[in-house]
Image: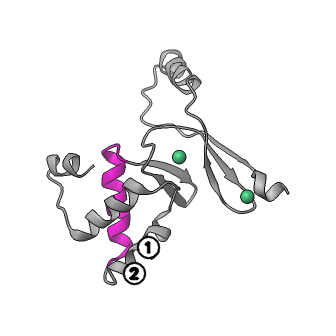
Amino acid sequence: MLTKLQDRGSRMTSHRLALLRIMAVSEGHPNAAQLYEKLREQFPTISLATIYKTLLVLKEDGQVFEIDMHNDSHYDGNKPYPHPHLICNKCGDIIDGDDVSFLDAIGQEIQEKYNFQIAQSQLLFYGVCQNCQS
Ligand SMILES: [Zn+2]
Ligand SMILES: [Zn+2]
């Protein structure tokens, strides 16, 4: 991640570095506010705007995958490519779906059928997770 960003000539601040580190090891799907809470312990002066800006750079660079949930985006630094997400309506948990090959097939079909260049895609399933069912 780091070399890729430096290649692009992005300015590397300690805040950005810290965010990169968190995203690289994160197994969940944090949103900007959750990342802000985490980083604030270490960097009391960090701003939410810096986090949004950094996430945007990472997203454009293909280093994180954005799950666009209305006004609340969550980010996946572990699987920075399209994959299904299962979202629990009760606890808000975001579960990674398997990487399904039909996603590629759907994309291919859409590109051909509509001559549409896909920049990104989202596959979200809303429902109730296993924990919340019991
Ligand atoms: Zn749940
Ligand atoms: Zn994910």
Secondary structure type for disc 1: helix
Instruction: Check whether the beta carbons of the residues at disc 2 and disc 1 lie within 8 A of each other.
Output: yes
The disc placed on residue 38 is 1
Q: Quadrant of residue 96?
A: top right
Q: In x, y percent, where is residue 81?
A: 44, 38
Q: Position of residue 115 (x, y in %)?
A: 46, 19
Determine the residue positioned at 30% across, 45% down: 61
Can residue 128 be seen in the rendering of this structure? no
Residue drawn 37% across and 49% down?
Answer: 59
Q: Give how far apart the Cα atoms at labels 2 and 1 are.
A: 6 Å
Residue drawn at the location 45% of the way across and 43% of the way down: 79
Task: Classify mark 2: residues with Cα within 10 Å, few (<14), some (14-19) or many (20+).
Answer: few
Instruction: Provide residue 29's location: percent of width, then percent of height.
Output: 52, 56
**Marker disc for residue 9:** none
Inspect the magenta stretch and tell me whether residue 24 lies in it: no
Dividing the image into four equal quarters, which quarter contains ligand 1? bottom right
Magenta segment:
46-63
- Kindly identify which numbered label has been placed on residue 41: 2
Q: Hey, what amino acid is under mark 1?
A: Lys
Q: Is residue 27 visible?
A: yes
Q: Is residue 117 above or below residue 112?
A: below
Quadrant of the frame with the C terminus: bottom right
